[in-house]
Image (tube, grey):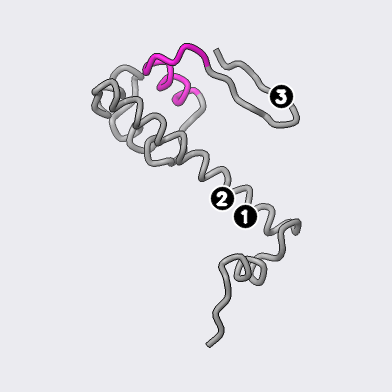
Amino acid sequence: MEFITFEEHLDQSLGKIGTPRRDRFEARMKAEEEAWKLGELVKENRKKQKLTQKQLGERVGVGEAQISRIESGRASTFTTISRVFKALGAKTASIDFGEFGRVALW
């Protein structure tokens, strides 16, 4: 039995970095990682304020289940996420679009 690294497995199954299929996979993984980080940030700030998911949901106007989905890195709308950050007291927010620049959200 031959052992290979995870990177070698990806190269064999999806192609090397730079091929369309591999680039789509890498982009999807990066997006999922960023969604997870966003969820962790929401969870950390909610806990600092000693709020339950239900209490934060009430402030935002969504259910507890929606807050749970956001905190676990599952998709939510941009509008809901910005309302969550406002409810947590974020003074300002911006998003970095890389080569296109940074945009202030509020």
Residue 35 numbered mark, or none:
none
Q: What element carries label 3?
A: loop
**Residue holding disc 3:** 101
Residue bearing mark 2: 29
Q: Position of residue 99 (x, y in %)?
A: 75, 31
Q: Is residue 51 left or right of residue 29?
A: left
Image check: 18 left or right of 10? right
Q: How far apart are marks 1 and 3 (CA)?
A: 24 Å
Q: Are marks 1 and 2 in contact (CB under 8 Å)?
A: yes
Please give the range of residues in magenta.
79-92
**Alpha-carbon distance for marks 1 and 2?**
6 Å
Q: Which of 59 and 45 is in front in this view?
A: 45
Neighbor class of circle 2 (other Cα within 10 Å; few <14, some 14-19, many 20+) is few
Which residue is label 1 attached to?
25
As for residue 89 lying within the magenta part, the answer is yes
Q: Position of residue 94 (x, y in %)?
A: 58, 20
User: Relative to 23, is 42 above or below?
Assistant: above
Q: Which amino acid does label 3 sit on?
A: Gly
Asked if the residues shown at circle 2 and circle 3 are in contact, with their CB atoms under 8 angstroms apart, the answer is: no
Type of amino acid at the residue the image marks with label 2: Met
Compare marks 2 and 3 and give the one earlier in the sequence: 2
Q: Which residue is drawn at 34% across and 19% down?
A: 61
- The structure residue drawn at horizontal position 74% and vertical position 27%, both measured from the top left corner, is 100
Q: Quadrant of residue 67?
A: top left
Kindly report the secondary structure that dominates the magenta region of the rendered protein: helix
- The quarter holding residue 52 reads top left
User: Crowding at label 3, few (<14), some or many (≥20) Cα neighbours within 10 Å?
Assistant: few
Secondary structure, mark 2, is: helix
Say which quadrant the C terminus sits in: top right
- Mark positioned earlier in the residue sequence (1 or 3): 1
Res 39 → quadrant: top left
